[in-house]
Amino acid sequence: TQLLEQSPQFLSIQEGENLTVYCNSSSVFSSLQWYRQEPGEGPVLLVTVVTGGEVKKLKRLTFQFGDARKDSSLHITAAQPGDTGLYLCAGGGNQGGKLIFGQGTELSVKP
Amino acid sequence: KAGVTQTPRYLIKTRGQQVTLSCSPISGHRSVSWYQQTPGQGLQFLFEYFSETQRNKGNFPGRFSGRQFSNSRSEMNVSTLELGDSALYLCASRLGGFSEKLFFGSGTQLSVL
């Protein structure tokens, strides 16, 4: 059974701080996606990484795929209250269209 | 372009009843996937339909079933509801290829009493 473990589960920080969320697995994934979900809404895709060692930047968010394609990280620089939400990593590509989701990281950024 | 539409938004049922949830994908999208989201288990894959055929299935009991119509709209049915079926049920659509971007709906919040 493929599993993705996310850490930390909860994160409460002040505006302006930096943070990193980790997503780890013992399995290799063809691709790794990061989503953000707000209360009452479905997840929205932020980025997809497919190459081992790949780094992608989206404004203040930096995503990295591990060399062995088993882990990934999301780094947010100078967090803002608008970054508050549930961040989910999802591994895909190994079983057709099925995505394996991590448990999520609940981020709260206080002004 | 309208997003993925799920109805109803909220549903309250009692144990033993059955329920049908509906999902209208983005126009032109032929693949529809269903996921169950709970605080304890997170997001878990139920099944995926493409061109009216189920092409992938998760590890859920047979009480969970689905179908897709010729216009790509999909329905999910849960029979003999159990308390543990209380969850947010999310539908996601994509054009068709496995590597294409998934677009999620806002979900149907099901409460089983």
Image: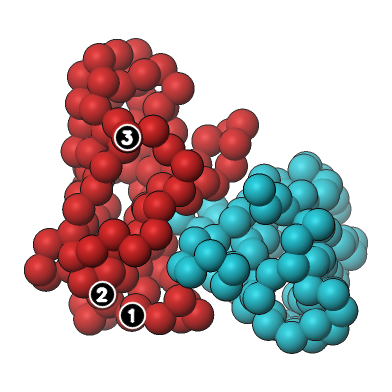
Specify the amino acid type for callout 2.
Arg
Residue pictured at 32% horizontal, 34% vertical? B62
Work out how far the residue at label 2 is from the one at label 3, CA to CA, in angstroms.
Answer: 24 Å
* The chain coloured cyan in the image: A
Image side of residue A37 versus residue A58, left or right: left
Mark 1 falls within which chain? B
Tell me which numbered mark, 1 or 2, is placed earlier along the sequence. 2
Specify the amino acid type for callout 3.
Gly
Tell me which numbered mark, 2 or 3, is placed earlier along the sequence. 2
Does any portion of residue A41 appear in the rendered image?
no
Instruction: Look at the image and give the colour of chain B.
Output: red
Task: Give the quarter of the image for residue A55.
Answer: bottom right
Disc on res. B30: 2
Q: Decide: is A37 above or below B94.
A: above
Q: Position of residue A97 (x, y in %)?
A: 46, 68
Tell me which numbered mark, 3 or 1, is placed earlier along the sequence. 3
Q: Residues within 10 Å of mark 3 (few under 14, many from 20)?
A: few
Specify the amino acid type for callout 1.
Leu
Disc on res. B67: none
Q: Decide: is A25 above or below B101.
A: above
Task: Between label 3 and label 1, give the one nearer the viewer.
Answer: 3
